[in-house]
């Protein structure tokens, strides 16, 4: 938009001054995503997202998960229904299996690209995992009430990448999606 001369709009010089100040704004010091108004990327969540993408690239269901302790990823996993014919291998279950035996989960966080189903919620409760970070709950609402009723902290990122990935997958593969969440196929 052109600013007419003599208007109350900031002068070009003032705008340039503001641009010079901009890099000193602490909000812009984080990665590019933060400069666009998103919170800084969490490496453990990114590991879960990458696992989901890997599954998608393999022709599988694009749901990924990661188990982390103090922000350090212990293991990642993704849904393996298609790849291994394993109906129990949801992303969360695969990540927990890959993590192997843990003396305690009390200091861990489970990251998952999609809201956990009843099976994975049961495992989170059983293992006493105190915190779950979820990419999105728009395409599947999961069992947040049950998790929270058992004292599990649930953080929902509402990450548009996860929403887009699942929406596209569900539209392209309605029968496979219905199978994974034990629903009768729509229509
Ligand atoms: Zn599940």
Image (tube, rainbow, N blue to C red):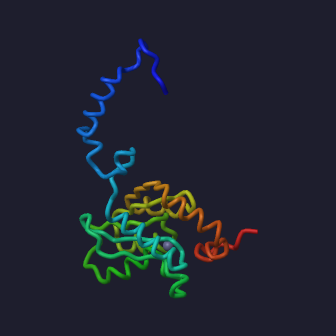
Q: Nearer the viewer, residue 46 or 6?
A: 6
Figure check: 89 above or below 146 = below
Q: Where is residue 94 shown, x and y percent of the image? A: 42, 79
Q: Farthest residue in the right direction? A: 187
Q: Residue at x 51, y 80 (%)?
A: 58
Q: Quadrant of residue 48?
A: bottom left
Count of number-bearing discs: 0
Q: Where is residue 69 shown, x and y percent of the image? A: 26, 68
Left or right of 144: which side holds 68?
Answer: left
Q: Residue at x 46, y 71 (%)?
A: 52
Left or right of 168: which side holds 71?
Answer: left
Left or right of 78: which side holds 169?
Answer: right
Q: Nearer the viewer, residue 103 or 95?
A: 95
Quarter containing the C terminus: bottom right
Q: Farthest residue in the top direction? A: 6
Q: Quadrant of residue 37?
A: top left
Q: Residue at x 27, y 75 (%)?
A: 104
Q: Farthest residue in the bottom direction? A: 84
Q: Where is residue 120 shown, x and y percent of the image? A: 46, 73
Q: Where is residue 68 shown, x and y percent of the image? A: 30, 69
Q: Residue at x 37, y 75 (%)?
A: 76
């Amino acid at each position: 938009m052109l600013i007419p001369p003599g208007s109350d709009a900031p002068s070009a010089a003032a705008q340039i001054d503001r641009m010079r100040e901009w890099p000193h704004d602490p909000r812009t010091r984080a990665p590019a995503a933060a400069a666009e108004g998103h919170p800084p990327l969490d490496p453990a969540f990114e590991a879960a997202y990458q696992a989901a993408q890997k599954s998608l690239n393999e022709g599988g269901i694009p749901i990924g998960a990661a188990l982390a302790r103090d922000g350090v990823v212990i293991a990642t996993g993704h849904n393996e229904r298609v790849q291994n014919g394993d109906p129990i291998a949801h992303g969360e279950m695969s990540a927990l299996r890959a993590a192997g035996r843990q003396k305690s989960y009390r200091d861990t966080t489970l990251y998952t690209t999609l809201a956990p189903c009843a099976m994975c919620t049961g495992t989170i409760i059983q293992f006493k995992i105190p915190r779950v970070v979820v990419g999105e709950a728009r395409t599947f609402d999961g069992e947040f009430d049950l998790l929270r009723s058992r004292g599990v902290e649930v953080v929902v990122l509402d990450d548009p990448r996860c929403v887009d990935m699942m929406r596209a997958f569900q539209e392209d593969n309605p029968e496979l999606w219905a199978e994974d969440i034990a629903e009768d196929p729509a229509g």
